[in-house]
Amino acid sequence: MPGWTTRGHAGQWGHAWYRLHVRWGVPPGSNPVLVGPTLVDSAYEIYWNGRKLAGIGDFSTDPPRVFGIRPKVIPLGENASTGEGLLAIHVYLPRESV
């Protein structure tokens, strides 16, 4: 699926960060999860309240190594039925993909 290059950022490559303040409510006894991401062209890392939860790719190298992308279910590690937190997604698009 095409990502930021077809959503108003054509010709851009490299690193990008997206942050979102999230409030949730789930039935008592349930635990909130994220589903996705689905619109990342290359590598990504997902953080919840500053704690890395998941990712695809290797960000320890420069440039990051890109692996295949598959959506997944990512538990937030929250036990409360309501709450809020900060979701951050770090994505990387290599120049060759543009």
Image (cartoon, rainbow, N blue to C red):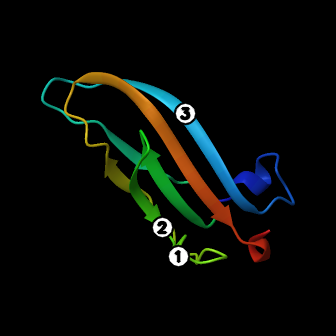
Query: Label for residue 39?
Result: none
Q: Residue at x 85, y 56 (%)?
A: 10
- How far apart marks 3 and 2 lie (CA) works out to 20 Å
Q: Position of residue 76 (x, y in %)?
A: 31, 43
Q: Is residue 35 left or right of residue 75?
A: right
Q: Residues within 10 Å of mark 2 (few under 14, many from 20)?
A: some
Tell me: residue 85, above or below residue 96. above
Q: Which mark is residue 67?
A: 1
In this view, the mark in front (1 or 3): 3
Quadrant in which the N terminus is drawn: bottom right
Q: Which quadrant of the structure image shows residue 26?
A: top left
Q: Which residue is mark 2?
A: 56
- Measure how far apart labels 1 and 3 are at the Cα level: 25 Å
- The three-letter code of the residue at mark 1 reads Phe
* Mark 1 vs 3, N-terminal side: 3
SS for dot 3:
strand
Residue at the (22%, 24%) spot, across then down: 81
Q: Earlier in the sequence, mark 3 or mark 2?
A: 3
Tell me the residue that label 3 is attached to.
20
Mark 1, Cα crowd under 10 Å, few <14 / some 14-19 / many 20+, is: few
Tag 2: amino acid: Ile
**Dot 1: element:** loop
Q: Nearer the viewer, residue 80 or 9?
A: 80
Quadrant of the rendered image containing residue 3: bottom right
